[in-house]
Amino acid sequence: MKKMKTIRLMQCFACCLFFMLTSLAVAQSDILQHTVAAGETLYGLSRAYGVSIENIVAANPGLSAETLHAGRVIRIPMRAGVTISAVQPASTAAHAAVPKADVGVAVVLPFTATGVEGERSVEFYRGFLAATEQIGKEGKRVNLFPYDEKQTDYSLQETLQKIKAAGVQLLVGPVYPAHFAEVAVFCRVNRIRMIVPFYSKAEQVNTNPWVYLVNTPQKFEFEHVADLFLKTFKDCNVAIMHVGDSNNGPFVSYLRRRLMATDCAVTEFSEQAPLEQMRSACSATKPTVIVPDAADVAALSKVLAKMEGFRKYYPSYPLRLFGYSKWLSQADAQAARLQLCNTYIYTDSYLNGFDAKTRAFLAAYESNYGEKPLQVWPRMCLLGHDVAQQVVRGMLRYGDAFAQQAADAHQLQSAISFERTEQDGGLVNKSLFFINYKPDGSINKLQENR
C-alpha cells in the first residue's frame, strides 16, 4: 500500500503545479539546502522534513519527479522562522497587516504555459526566488505568493481577490497584454505596485502611477541613449552609415535631431559607397563616431568589414563605432574586431562572464535545477534576480519612496532603477550602459548617472 501510494503521488504530481502556484505563500527567511541522494523521492523528502510536496515544489520552480535526481541541491522551506500558509479565500481572510520589516510580493506569470512564455517565466521566477532567499538570510522577511497566469481570454479576478486578501505591496506581472488593464486598475484601487517584467508597451504606464515597466518603452529608451551619447561623445563628429534596409531608422532620426540641436557636425554615407566617400564624411584630426542605421546581427558583419577596410587605407583617422544591444549576441566571437573599431554598444543589461558573483550565481542555478539558463538576452534568471534586488530591497529600505533609490548594488546583469513618465503617470526603467570594446583589449562599462 505504501508503495502504491508513493506511485500515485508521483503520477499526480504534475497536476499539483497549478494548485501550488495559485494557493501557496512561501516565506523566505531560512531555507535548508538538501542534496538529493540516490533513490530519494519527493514523497520521502516531504515525510522526512514534515513539509508538503507542494511546498517543496514552490521553493524549487520546475521541480518534479522526473527532474529530481541524485546530486541536485534543492530548497526545503521548513526551518525555524519559516512559515508556509495557504492563502484563504477573499470572503474569509482578513487583509493582512505586514510589519515594516516584511514585504509581500505576488508573482503572476504563466508558469504552466507551453513554449517561450512558460519557459521564461519559470526561469525568471527562479532568479527572483534566489534573490529573496539572499535577502531573507540578512534578517528580512519576504512573503512570496506565486500564481499561474492563464491565457489571454481568462479573467484574473479570482486571482486578484486572493492577492488582495494576502495584503501584498508588490505584484510582479502579468505577461499577457490582455490582462494589463484589469491588473492595473486593481493595483491602483488597492495601492499595490505593479511591476511589469517583460513588456514595454503597457499604455497604462502613462496614466497610472502604480505601474512600473522593467522593459523601457522606446520613447524613453531613445531619450536615455541620446543623453548618454551626447555626454560620451561631446567632442566628436558623427557620421551616419546607411546599411541595407535601415531597420533602426527611427532611433537614428531621433539621434540626428538631438545632435543637430547641439550644433554637432553630422555627415552621412552608404555602407556600399567607396572608401573615399567615407573618408570625406570623417575627420582626420577629430574623432568621428560611426553610427549605422541598422541594428540587426546581419548588419554587424557588413559594418565591421567596412570599418576594417577603411582602417587599412586610412589608419590615422580616429574613428569610433556605435552599435546596438543585438550585437552582444556575437560579442564573444567578434570581440577582437569590435576592439579594433573602438566599439560602443548600448544596452540595458550586460552579462559579465568574468564577474565572480555572476559566475557563482549561474553555477548555482545549473546545480540547483540541473539545466543551463535559456540562451536568450537578457538572461531570464538574472533578470528575475535583479528585479527582486531592486524592488524588494527598495520596499524594505525606503517603503513608499523606494522608486527614488538608485540601482541596487546587488544586481548582476542590469542597473534597474525607475523614473516617472510624467506627473500622474507610472515609472519606467532607466537602466542603460555603453559597453566599450577598447583597442587595448579591455572592456569598459559606461553608465549615465541620472
Image (cartoon, rainbow, N blue to C red):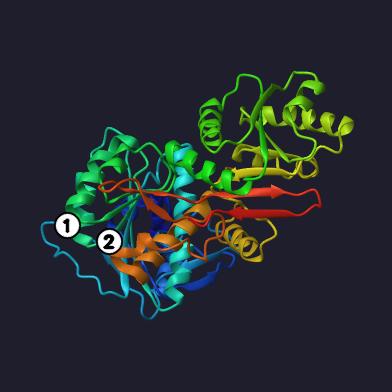
List x then y, in percent, for residue 129. Answer: 44, 61
The answer to which image quadrant residue 142 occupies is bottom left
Q: Which residue is mark 2?
A: 169
Q: Nearer the viewer, residue 66 or 297?
A: 297
Marks 2 & 1, CB-CB < 8 Å contact: no
Please tell me which residue is depicted at 44% across the width and 56% down the height of the picture: 417
Circle on res. 178: none
Furthest residue toward right? 313
Q: Is residue 36 above or below residue 349?
A: below
Q: Secondary structure at mark 1?
A: loop
Badge count? 2
Residues packed near mark 1 inside 10 Å, few (<14), some (14 to 19) or many (20 plus): some
Q: Is residue 392 left or right of residue 445?
A: left
- Viewer-proximal residue among 447 and 410: 447
Instruction: Locate the N terminus and report the quarter of the image it occupies.
Output: bottom left
Residue that appears at 74% across and 31% down? 282
Precedes in sequence: disc 2 or disc 1: 1
Who is closer to the viewer here, 238 or 49? Answer: 238
Query: Residue 89 has which mark?
Result: 1
Q: Residue at coordinates 28% horizontally, 74% vertically from top-left?
A: 100
Q: Is residue 24 left or right of residue 134?
A: left
The kind of residue tagged 2 is Gln
**Residue 151 seen in render:** no
One can see residue 155 in this view: yes
Which residue appears farthest toward the front when viewing the image?
263
Relative image position of residue 337 (x, y in whole percent): 79, 40
The kind of residue on which mark 1 rests is Pro
Q: Could you say which is closer to the camera, residue 64 or residue 306?
A: 306
Vertical placement of residue 64 versus 255, above or below: below
Which of the 4 image quadrants contains residue 170?
bottom left
- How many angstroms separate mark 2 from mark 1 (CA)? 18 Å
